[in-house]
Image: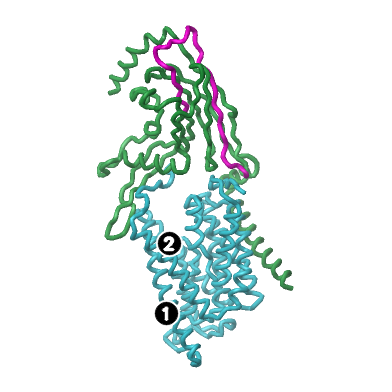
Chain colours: A cyan, B green
């Protein structure tokens, strides 16, 4: 069934969009990532103009994150306090990120910077997570007891608070910094930042993997809602009909994804996420290093 | 060049005035509505050659039909390898490129249309795309407009349909132009050219309005005129859908 999208000004198959939304929704519920780094390239592939794809995927991520976070709330795997601290840092970070983005755009080549950022961060994060979770799986196979959480410099910082859901008693400074850093990168790269936030919470803050997913989704809702409004009011590029089709698939997928995620071991979840991140990174790297099929491309409407 | 073209026109206009031929045409639709289920459309163009004098059999009359969408300014990027990475290295601005363009003819273009007439009426795709100047460091700017034609032809937005115009008894003609699903809104122009010996002897043009209707129109207007409300509405839908799915799943799972 073909449907004409009013803002994208293109006719696409409705079932294709439902399927895309569903697939990304499942990943979102399983891993706590918004899926922006997946759905935007997929929409390009379908033929949606890039500006519309970026803005509309932000809108669809709001929906699947709400759906996912509610499922996590019921399981009490959302650390509200941690989420709010991360969000506070994130808002500061994304405000700074938007400024940097504008400077880059004035210098030209913002597109290249974004791609390089993606490849470097996805590659580094994916590789680290992959190695770490592989080791974790090997250790549990051997039957060794899980490693106790180490006390490092993070625990020496002042302003400590209790994050009861996460079982942590640490200073607010590290989560604020993590939030700000993710917000900064998210604003430059135009994504919710889940794929950076999730590993940062696991490895830098020591939050348990199950709590990380719900908490990450919680903070993604606010970041992407803000982005959606910004795009809708400045660029008029949010396509409501496209978002609706994507999010019908997305919210259902997120529920299924959450169920799958709850049945899996933390290490397995982490290794799958690592593979996914590495796959996206590989695709982007190939685009940069291989000769493109067509050297020419049509740029933005300059009117 | 231009002076030559004018001279050429003056020299050959005179004998043709005597056997004045006019082209008249009609369309099956002058208003195309884009609704939610819009999946492309077919435009039928038909007409006749009106003559005051008996048919001159020395040169065959030929018909060229063009359909042109609203124009826009574009940038065409060309990638090059710099330090091992493919980046957009060169950019050329196209001053006016039609969003849709089709040329249908009754015979091969090089036989029925001379260069000078093509330049004057901007009939072929290469002429219809307006490119005033290119940066000096770009070696071959015409490659960029060629690339635009190639890319848009791949999306069926630029079409050259040689021999698609049926011309009967050197008088009646008709053709069909397939409008693709990824059509943009605006006023389209259909032009019909009657040529003899490569010279354009008569033209006819008419407008076709392409516009969104119903839900499409409503959403588009809302997005542009009430952007904040539209944005908030989009968010409300997203949140409601997320909550709804969660509630349904909880109910299903007991």
Residue B215 percent coordinates (x, y)? 64, 44
Crowding at dot 1, Cα within 10 Å, few <14 / some 14-19 / many 20+, comes out as: few
**The magenta segment:** B36-65
User: What subunit carries mark 2?
Assistant: A
Disc 1 is placed on an element classified as helix
Q: Give the position of the C terminus of chain A as an image quadrant.
A: top left
Q: Nearer the viewer, residue A109 or A291?
A: A291
Element at label 2: helix
Q: Is residue B44 left or right of residue A154?
A: right
Nearest-to-viewer mark from 2 and 1: 1
Q: Position of residue B232 (x, y in %)?
A: 61, 55
Q: Dot 2: within a 10 Å radius of its alpha carbon, few (fewer than 14), some, or many (20 or more) residues?
A: many
Determine the residue positioned at 54% across, 20% down.
B47
Percent across and percent down for residue A53 are 51, 54
Question: For residue A189, which quarter of the picture?
Answer: bottom left
Q: Tag on residue B113?
A: none
Q: Which residue is mark 1?
A: A131
Q: At x 47% / y 37%, what residue is drawn?
A: B100
Q: Chain of mark 1?
A: A
């Amino acid at each position: 069934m073909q449907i004409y999208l009013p803002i994208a000004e293109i006719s696409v198959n409705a079932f294709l969009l439902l399927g895309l939304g569903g697939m990304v929704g499942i990943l979102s519920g399983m891993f706590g990532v918004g899926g922006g780094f997946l759905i935007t390239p997929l929409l390009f592939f379908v033929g949606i103009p890039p500006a519309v794809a970026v803005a509309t995927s932000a809108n669809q991520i709001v929906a699947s994150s709400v759906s996912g976070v509610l499922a996590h709330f019921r399981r009490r795997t959302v650390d509200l306090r941690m989420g709010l601290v991360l969000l506070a840092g994130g808002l500061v970070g994304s405000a700074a990120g938007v400024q940097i983005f504008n400077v880059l755009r004035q210098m030209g080549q913002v597109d290249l910077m974004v791609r390089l950022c993606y490849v470097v961060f996805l590659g580094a994060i994916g590789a680290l997570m992959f190695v770490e979770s592989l080791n974790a799986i090997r250790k549990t196979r051997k039957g060794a007891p899980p490693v106790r959480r180490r006390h490092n410099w993070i625990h020496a910082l002042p302003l400590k608070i209790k994050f009861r859901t996460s079982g942590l008693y640490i200073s607010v400074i590290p989560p604020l910094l993590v939030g700000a850093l993710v917000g900064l990168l998210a604003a430059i790269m135009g994504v919710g930042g889940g794929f950076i936030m999730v590993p940062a919470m696991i490895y830098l803050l020591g939050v348990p993997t199950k709590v990380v997913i719900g908490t990450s989704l919680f903070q993604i809702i606010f970041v992407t809602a803000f982005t959606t409004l910004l795009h809708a009011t400045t660029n008029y590029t949010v396509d409501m009909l496209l978002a609706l089709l994507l999010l019908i698939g997305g919210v259902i997928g997120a529920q299924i994804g959450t169920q799958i995620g709850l049945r899996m071991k933390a290490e397995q979840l982490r290794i799958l996420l690592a593979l996914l991140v590495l796959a996206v990174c590989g695709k982007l790297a190939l685009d940069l290093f291989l000769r493109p099929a067509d050297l020419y491309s049509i740029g933005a409407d300059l009117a | 060049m231009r002076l030559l073209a004018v001279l050429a026109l003056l020299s050959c206009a005179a004998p043709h005035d005597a056997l004045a031929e006019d082209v008249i045409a009609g369309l099956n639709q002058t208003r195309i509505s884009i609704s939610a289920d819009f999946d492309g459309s077919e435009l039928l163009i038909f007409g006749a050659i009106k003559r005051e004098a008996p048919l001159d059999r020395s040169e065959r009359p030929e018909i060229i039909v063009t359909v042109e969408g609203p124009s826009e300014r574009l940038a065409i990027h060309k990638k090059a390898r710099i330090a091992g990475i493919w980046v957009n290295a060169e950019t050329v601005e196209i001053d006016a490129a039609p969003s849709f363009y089709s040329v249908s003819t009754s015979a091969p273009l090089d036989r029925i249309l001379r260069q000078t007439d093509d330049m004057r009426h901007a009939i072929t795709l290469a002429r219809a795309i307006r490119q005033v100047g290119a940066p000096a460091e770009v070696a071959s700017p015409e490659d960029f407009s060629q690339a635009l034609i190639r890319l848009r032809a791949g999306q069926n937005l630029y079409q050259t349909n040689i021999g698609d115009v049926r011309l009967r008894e050197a008088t009646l003609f008709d053709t069909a132009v397939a409008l693709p699903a990824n059509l943009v809104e605006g006023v389209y122009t259909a032009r019909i050219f009657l040529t003899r010996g490569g010279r354009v002897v008569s033209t006819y043009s008419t407008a076709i309005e392409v516009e969104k209707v119903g839900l499409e129109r409503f959403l588009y207007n809302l997005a542009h005129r009430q952007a904040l409300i539209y944005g908030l509405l989009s968010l409300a839908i997203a949140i409601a859908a997320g909550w709804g799915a969660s509630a349904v799943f909880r109910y299903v799972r007991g």
